[in-house]
Image (cartoon, helix red, strand yellow):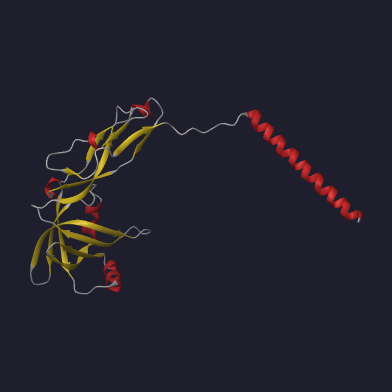
Amino acid sequence: MTTVALAAQSRTETGKGVARSLRRQALTPAVFYGPGVDPIPLILQTRDLEPLITTGAGENILIDLNIEDGKSTQSHRAMIKEIQVDPVKQNILHVDLYAISMDKKISVEVPITLIGTAVGVSDEGGILQQVSRTLEVSCLPDRIPDAFELEVTDLTIGDSLHVSDLEIPEGIEVLAEDELTIASVVPPTKVEEIEPEVLEEEEEEEAEGEEVEEKAEAETKEEGDQE
């Protein structure tokens, strides 16, 4: 389990205007909260956040949070609860940090990684579908795995793997049903081909229809001229 240190500065001013001003200074507004903790608005260095978000462990990183208020420093253990990102610019807008205790279980989503190439794909032309990409578990913070790995090499078309096929380390409680499907190999999508003869017949029928319409229009026009 990855553990990193993160420095933060407490702040007294809040609001959208303050948040925009902080972002212009390469700072990120944040808040720290949790059981038995009064919410503390924070200021984080954006450059310190970016490596945490791109480590691959996602939000399941243990953080040694050091909060300075100008007079003293508070130390807490935390995890990233939520990250708000601008959908266009992709820059970090806001971060929620959640207080945790190392002796109390928490519920988290752990990524599932598929290993190998299924024979149903390589030899039979099937398509591997990953139905579930994360698995919710309950465990102590220092027991959170970076990911669950699942071997798919032996899967043929029609085969599936479920939660029950995962190797779950000791001390981790899975909060999903054993029957939940994680991955399966399905037949390739078939594109129906139109026979040339059928296509020619349809084209002939369309041409005949167009001729009838043109003839009818001509007759209607001729009748109108005669009147």
Residue occupying the point 11% across, 64% down: 36
Left/right placement of residue 32 relative to residue 227 reads: left
Whether residue 40 is situated above or below residue 192 in the rendered picture = below
The answer to which quarter of the image holds residue 153 is: top left
Whether residue 111 is situated above or below residue 127 in the rendered picture = below
Whether residue 179 is situated above or below residue 31 in the rendered picture = above
Q: Where is residue 213 in the image (x, y as percent from the top left)?
A: 77, 45
Residue occupying the point 40% across, 26% down: 124
Seen from the viewer's position, the closer of residues 117 and 102 is 102
Residue occupying the point 20% across, 65% down: 31
Q: Position of residue 68 (x, y in %)?
A: 12, 67
If the image is split into quadrants, where does the C terminus sit?
A: bottom right
Seen from the viewer's position, the closer of residues 39 and 68 is 39
Q: Is residue 140 at least partly visible in the picture?
A: yes
The mark tally for this picture is 0
* Farthest-out residue, right: 226
Left/right placement of residue 150 relative to residue 209 reads: left
Seen from the viewer's position, the closer of residues 217 and 114 is 217
The answer to which quarter of the image holds residue 215 is: top right
Q: Is residue 145 at least partly visible in the picture?
A: no
Q: Where is residue 26 in the image (x, y as percent from the top left)?
A: 26, 64
Residue occupying the point 36% across, 37% down: 129
Q: Where is residue 128 in the image (x, y as percent from the top left)?
A: 36, 34
